[in-house]
Amino acid sequence: MKTCVDLLIENVGRLLPGHEEALMGVSVAVDAGQIQAIGPAEKLAGLFDGSQTLDGTGKLLTAGFVDSHTHLVFGGERSGEFVQRCAGADYEHIASKGGGIRASVRMTRAADLQQLVDSARPRLQRMMESGSTTIEIKSGYGLDLENELKMLRAIRQLSEEFPIEIVATFMGAHEIPDEWRQDRAEYIRIICQQMIPQVAREGLAEFCDVFCERGVFDTQESIQILQAGLENGLKPKIHADELAASGGSLVAAQVGAISADHLMEVTTEGIEALKSAGVVPTLLPGTTFYLRKSGYAPARSLIDAGLEIAIATDRNPGSCTIESMLFIAGLSVMHMGLTPTEAIIAATRGGSHALGRGPLCGTIEAGKRADLILWDVPDEEVLIHEFANQVPRIVCAAGRIVFDSHIASIERSDLTSDQGV
Ligand code: NIG
Ligand code: FE
């Protein structure tokens, strides 16, 4: 008697992460949203019947991407700044003139909750279709109690709508809003004593993040905010050493942050601190690329120090609009010296560690959530080589097929022939 399972992915050529050694002809049985069994195709064919089956012959199966750092909910858009930067203006200069994050704050405050949800939905849909099955989203364009809560409620609504896992982070400390620029201590007091307790009471976020950077929040302020988060049950994350070596990695180690993100300017001392405190370095090469900087984060030094890195998109309205984790993996290989295998692992297992979800997702193992991408390529080298393209794929989130590019392209070709008649 064979056991009936929801989905059987048969005779896959290569699985990653979890099975880096060469494997041929492996099947994966999925039921009740989880990976139930992995084994030789012939053996599993004798044990399981799939209500649905996918043929993996000659294909690569990876875990779903875990995008552990995004700001994908926001009002308005900032394409004008991109054009200014391409003509030579600098990100920090634009920010100092009231652009940058503060421009998005004005547009986000002007939008209501439903407008925020409606504008974020297509971004999230594209990200899911590109293979991201766990996505973290930060607040941080409201910068007052009412508007930060509005953003977090928009994130909660999106998480109820989508079949993938959404993780919310409170980031009231993304910037000092215009109205508190003459009294930053008061804004920090509001974050610590009003915003964080309210966000925690309503269960609207799991993490608390701070932009520790020259001209934004300094190390002492960052510690104060992240400690207030900890006291209210929000786990710390930090934007660290992005544009200057501002001590963010040392703060991350001191408060026991789960991740330190960006790290373009991290020092040797910073790397040692991250290592000793078990902080996950999260690298965002899309931002380096998009800001037209040359100093990519030192991924090899971090890996050589024995750290497991994560890579993420940082999707936001200003410094990076890239949504595809495959594109980010490609940049990591091109500009940070990762091998294709390391890049896929950093985009999956690495991201799961940066969100404290190592036991749940990020690898292909029995017992993990069935977040999977079946790619029409034989291995990760071919996949990364095509990083800027729409590689044919089937995306599965918690055991359910949420996107099949083959079906989408059939619909498109129908449309074309109709129009041609
Ligand atoms: O991660 N560094 C701070 N926050 C974002 C930028 C957000 C923005 O420009 O709107 C980042 O790059
Ligand atoms: Fe960011």
Image (spheres, helix red, strand yellow):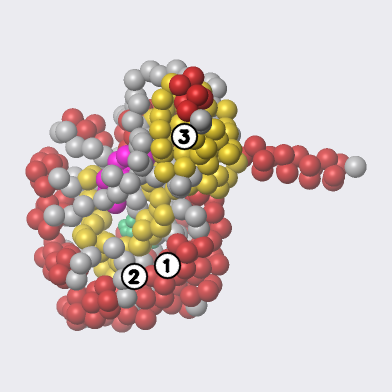
Kind of residue at badge 1? Arg
Q: Which residues are magenta?
A: 347-355
Q: In the rendering, at what x and y percent does residue 18 appear? A: 33, 30
Q: Which mark is residue 156?
A: 1
**Dot 3 lies on which element?**
strand
Q: Earlier in the sequence, mark 3 or mark 1?
A: 3
Q: Residues within 10 Å of mark 1 (few under 14, many from 20)?
A: some
Say which residue appears at 26% left-offset and 68% top-offset: 173
The CA distance from mark 3 to mark 1 is: 31 Å
**Dot 1 lies on which element?**
helix
The CA distance from mark 1 to mark 2 is: 7 Å
**Residue closer to the observer: 382 or 46:** 46
Q: In the rendering, at what x and y percent does residue 57 appear? A: 55, 22
User: Could you tell whether 191 is left or right of 269 in the image?
Assistant: right
Residue placed under numbered mark 2 in the picture: 204
The CA distance from mark 2 to mark 3 is: 34 Å
Residue placed under numbered mark 3 in the picture: 29
User: Could you tell whether 51 is left or right of 173 in the image?
Assistant: right
- Do the numbered discs 1 and 2 sit on residues whose CB atoms are within 8 Å? yes
Say which residue appears at 12% left-offset and 52% top-offset: 253
User: Could you tell whether 364 is left or right of 235 in the image?
Assistant: right
Q: Which mark is residue 102?
A: none
